[in-house]
Amino acid sequence: MKLKVLLHPAEEGGFWAEVPALPGCVSEGETFEETLANIREAAEGWLVVAAEQALAETQVQVAEIEL
């Protein structure tokens, strides 16, 4: 899965990032590379929590596919 990430310079130095497709998914880092690693981790966590919440609310089964 590929997601667009917006990287912004932080006022205090470093960067902060957001994934527009995942509301509230943000992270930060001191370097561009660190920020990308952090936002990847945040997005993975966001997706795990969203899937768990969906399962808790319904009788849905989850499967993974690779794109």
Image (spheres, helix red, strand yellow):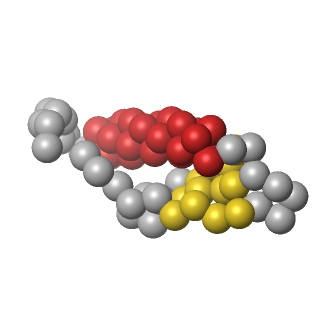
Q: Quadrant of residue 33?
A: top right
Instruction: Indicate the position of residue 39 as horizontal and vertical percent values.
Output: 54, 45
Is any part of residue 53 visible from this angle?
Answer: no
Q: State the quadrant of the C terminus.
A: top left
Instruction: Residue at 47%, 41% (x, y): give it.
Output: 40
- Whether residue 22 is visible to the viewer of this picture, yes or no, is yes
Q: Residue at x 45, y 66 (%)?
A: 20
Residue 50: where, in percent of width, then height?
Answer: 39, 45
Count of residue discs:
0
Q: Is residue 61 left or right of residue 52?
A: left
Q: Nearer the viewer, residue 25 or 14?
A: 14
The x, y position of residue 45, in whole percent, is: 47, 37
Depth order, front residue of 24/66: 66
Tell me what residue is drawn at x 29 percent, y 51 percent.
2
* Picture quadrant where residue 18 is located: bottom right
Q: Residue at x 66, y 56 (%)?
A: 16
Relative to residue 17, is residue 9 drawn left or right? Answer: right
Q: Is residue 6 above or below residue 38?
A: below
Question: Please, is residue 66 above or below residue 10 in the view?
Answer: above
**Dividing the picture into quarters, in which one does residue 36 lie?**
top right
Direction front: furthest residue: 32
Q: Is 8 left, or right, of 21 in this rendering? A: right
Q: Residue furthest right?
A: 12
| Frontmost residue, 14 versus 61 | 14
